[in-house]
């Protein structure tokens, strides 16, 4: 099995290294949904909560068996 990318806080600084306000806002939202997991569940992301950010990111499904994204 391939090793997948790991979430790492930059040298223990956490999200404080993000300087751009909107990117920090998105990161804080995402981190709040994670609840200790690597990624939040897709159903946890509610577009109503983040209308200002919808043009800035997208969700992708990854299939481990075929190593494909959709």
Image (spheres, rainbow, N blue to C red):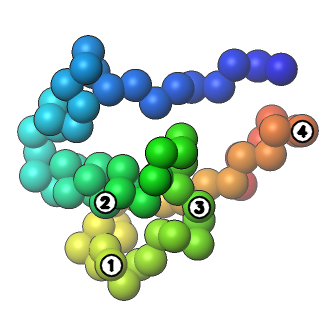
Where does label 3 land, which residue?
41
* Separation of residues labelled 4 and 1 (CA atoms): 33 Å
Residue 9 x, y percent position in the rendering = 32, 26
* Separation of residues labelled 2 and 4 (CA atoms): 30 Å
Q: Could you tell me which secondary element the residue under label 1 belongs to?
A: helix
Q: Earlier in the sequence, mark 4 or mark 3?
A: 3
Residue 3 x, y percent position in the rendering = 69, 19
* Separation of residues labelled 1 and 3 (CA atoms): 15 Å
Image quarter hosting the N terminus: top right
- Looking at the image, do the residues carrying marks 1 and 2 touch, with CB atoms under 8 Å apart? yes
Q: Could you tell me which secondary element the residue under label 4 belongs to?
A: loop
Identity of the residue drawn at 16% across and 30% down = 17
Q: Earlier in the sequence, mark 1 or mark 3?
A: 3
In front here: 62 or 10?
A: 10
State which mark lies toward you, 4 or 3. Answer: 3
Residue 31 x, y percent position in the rendering = 36, 50
- Looking at the image, do the residues carrying marks 2 and 4 touch, with CB atoms under 8 Å apart? no
Neighbour tally class for label 3: few under 14, some 14-19, many 20 plus, Cα within 10 Å: few
Q: Is residue 58 above or below residue 6?
A: below
Identity of the residue drawn at 29% across and 67% down = 53
Q: Earlier in the sequence, mark 2 or mark 3?
A: 2
In front here: 11 or 61?
A: 11
Q: Which mark is residue 29?
A: 2
Where does label 4 land, which residue?
65
Identity of the residue drawn at 31% across and 60% down = 29
In front here: 21 or 7?
A: 7
State which mark lies toward you, 2 or 4. Answer: 2
Q: Which mark is residue 49?
A: 1
View extreme (right): residue: 65
* Separation of residues labelled 1 and 2 (CA atoms): 9 Å
Q: Is residue 5 above or below residue 70?
A: above
């Amino acid at each position: 099995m391939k090793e997948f990318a790991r979430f790492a806080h930059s040298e223990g600084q956490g999200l404080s290294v993000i300087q751009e306000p909107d990117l920090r806002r998105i990161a804080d939202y995402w981190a709040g949904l994670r609840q200790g997991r690597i990624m939040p569940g897709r159903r946890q992301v509610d577009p109503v909560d983040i209308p200002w950010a919808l043009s800035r990111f997208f969700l992708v499904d990854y299939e481990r068996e075929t190593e494909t994204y959709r």
